[in-house]
Image (tube, rainbow, N blue to C red):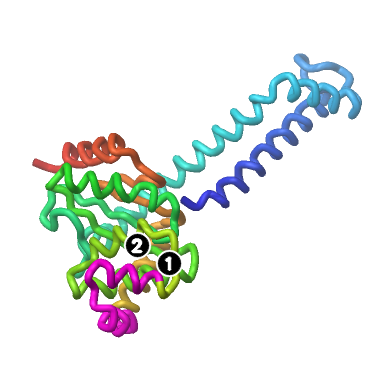
Amino acid sequence: MNNQRSIVLLLIGAVVMVVAVFAALRFAGSGGDEVPSTAMSKGDVEKIVRNYLLENPEVIFEAVDRMKAKEEGDRLVNLEDNAKKHAAALFREAEPIVAGNPKGDVTIVEFFDYRCPYCKKGKQVVSDLLKQDGNIRLVLKEYPILSPESELAARAAVASVPQGKYWDFHLALMGAEELSEDAVFAIAKDVGIDVAKLKADMKSDKVDARLRDVQALGKAVGVDATPTFFIGDKPFTGVMTMDELKGAVAAARKAKPS
């Protein structure tokens, strides 16, 4: 999951909090019956704040954690709202790439990047879930946002669909440490794909359109990190445990109209 933006915002939040403390103490004597009649000197303010933070450093971390939780909460609300606006493209596209049960009663949509370490870490849990629950429809959205290698692997994966080897190829790519052109085609050969046909199909307008449409959809919905899941009408980001996935699926089933 891409957290660089979050980390920057958290650091800014911590700095803003410290500045706010300075400002509040500096002007504590500016008026009112419940404050000192004489403002403290700049040296007094600096000493008080410094001593307080040295004695209570957990305050900074508490503020950062609270800001992080608020940001993530706001982000999930935004994803959920946008998912409703684009539900047809997310869940009911004309030619989806599907694993699991195409007629499953619960749909999971996953945006992923083959270079994403979190996607790689979670791929076995997702695969195991499909084996354990035969009534899940997994819709896969290649979302290469990390590197040119990400785009190459995504293009190859989409181009493998006509050969009926997508899922095996997908799992192999997700488990690969290297995704150079040679490595991708070697993986394709290992899973039984006709590499010459794959190379030709990778240049097709249909593959171009698929990758372009998923990029546009991801941006419209607000997907800015991988993996991002939509289970029922709820979004989730980052690696999910088996219990978390099963809980989300159970909630989606319960929410379905009878």
**Label tally:** 2
Determine whether, in the image, residue 129 is placed left or right of residue 236.
left
Q: Residue at x 55, y 33 (%)?
A: 65
Location of residue 25 in the rendering, given as x and y in whole percent from the top left corner: 79, 26
The residue under label 2 is which amino acid type? Leu
Vertical placement of residue 232 versus 19, above or below: below
Q: Position of residue 132 (x, y in %)?
A: 17, 42
Which range is magenta? 183-205
The residue that appears at 8% across and 41% down in the rendered structure is 258
Q: Earlier in the sequence, mark 1 or mark 2?
A: 2
Question: Which residue is drawn at the image coordinates 68% and 34% (left, top)?
Answer: 17
Q: Which mark is residue 173?
A: 2
Q: Which residue is mark 1?
A: 179
Question: Is residue 155 something one can see in this rendering?
Answer: no
Locate residue 73 relative to residue 4 in the image: left or right.
left
Q: Which numbered disc covers residue 249?
A: none
CB atoms of marks 1 and 2 within 8 Å: yes
